[in-house]
Each structure stands twice: as C-alpha cells, then as structure tokens.
Amino acid sequence: MIEVYNIGELKDLTAWLEQYVKPRLGSDVSGYARGRRRAWLGIEPALTDSYKAKPGVPIEPVIHERLVQLISWDFDYCLVTYSDVQAIGITPHRDAKYADYEARGLNVSGTCKFDYWCGRQGFGRSPNTREFNPKVDPPTHSYQLTPGSVVRFNCKNLHAAIPSACRWNINFWRAAVK
C-alpha cells in the first residue's frame, strides 16, 4: 500500500533544517545511499541491531510535536536526508529491522522521483504477495514528489528515491514490535 498527499510549502521547516541540521549532517552509512548526507533527530537506531541505538541530533519537544502535527502521525525515529548538489538519493531497498512496517516520508524542499514496488498489500505486517527484482521489474508505483508531499508506505516493500539537487527530506518510523 502507498498513499501520497500534500500539506503545502514548508519554508519555516526548510530554514530550520538549513540553520540547525545542515551543520550536523554526516555521511550516510547505508550501502544503498553512498554519498548522501543525513542526520538522525533524537535517536539513531542501529541498522543491524535494533537494541543498539545512539544519540542523534538533539531536538526540543516542540520540534518533535511540530513534526508529528505536520504528518499527523507519532514516530520513534526520524531521519533527515539532504541530497546536496550531487543529487544523491537511495537505490531500491527495504528498511532495516529497527523499523515497523508503516513509514512516512516528508519531502520538505526540492523534488524527488519516488519509486515503489508493492509486494505487501497493507501498511502493517502483511505477507509478501509478490517478490520483485528492481533490476528487471518496473515499479508498481512512481510519484514525482514536490515540497510538502507526504508519502505513507510499507517500508518492507522495495522503494527508492531519485532527488533533485539540494533536496531536504525527512523519513519517520515507529520502532518495530519485538
């Protein structure tokens, strides 16, 4: 499953990201996003072990609440990505085991082609009805995201992002149920 809707331009959030988060960006450790810049807000989950987390960029509770309000969904993990002038995105992948099935992405600025292969039909835990190979199978859904686009999707399905230069994006997850 996937849904896309738009909440309007986010100039105040873009300004906050430029001022507060940009100086704290680091290199992405994911092999699917080599060269992309990113920062976890609040807490950074380990990609391989959901019990090993470390502090992310500190944020005030008012910022967390504002993000919850923008996407109408509470979350445990929040990853900010910046494509920089090289427009580096992320190749087809499924999110790591720290994340529960449902996820949200907020395209804050710039544009992005978001590709999605819908093998699981629900937002929650659901069986895979079809296995896709992104090297030969075209995406089942492809969206051109604009500033303010919110994507609600099952992050255990394959997905990829091809951003414009200097695009800000924020992804949100709840912790996987143990």
Image (cartoon, helix red, strand yellow):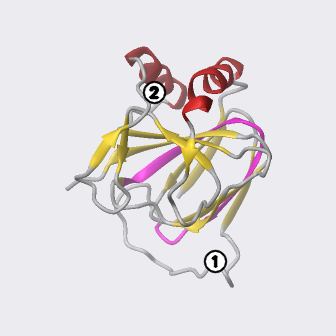
User: Left of 101 or right of it: where is 157?
Assistant: right
Crowd band around label 2 with a 10 angstrom C-alpha radius: few (<14), some (14–19), many (20+): some
The furthest residue to the left: 178
**Residue 176 in sight from this viewpoint:** yes
In the rendering, at what x and y percent does residue 19 appear?
Answer: 63, 21
Which corner quadrant holds the C terminus?
Answer: bottom left
Residue at x 22%, y 53% (from the top left corner): 51
Which residue does the image show at 52% across and 32% down from the upper left? 71
Evaluate if marks 1 and 2 touch, with contact meaning CB atoms under 8 Å apart: no
**Kind of residue indicated by mark 1:** Pro
Q: Which residues are magenta?
A: 100-120
Residue 117 visible from this viewpoint? no
Is residue 102 rendered magenta in the image?
Answer: yes
Residue 58 numbered tag: none
How far across and how far down the image is residue 117, in percent?
Answer: 59, 69
- Give the prevailing secondary structure in the magenta stretch: strand
| Kind of residue sitting beneath label 2 | Val
166 or 133, nearer to the observer: 166
* Residue 165 point in image, percent of width and height: 80, 45
* Residue at image mark 1: 134
User: Residue 68 shows which numbered tag?
Assistant: 2
Q: In the picture, residue 60 is in which quadrant?
A: top left
Given residues 50 and 131, the one toward you in this image is 50
- Reply above or below: 72 against 144: above
> What residue is at 66 percent from the left and 26 percent from the top?
18
For label 2, the SS is helix
From the viewer's perspective, is residue 168 above or below residue 30?
Answer: above
Distance of label 1 from label 2 (alpha carbons): 32 Å
Residue 44: in magenta span: no
Secondary element at image label 1:
loop
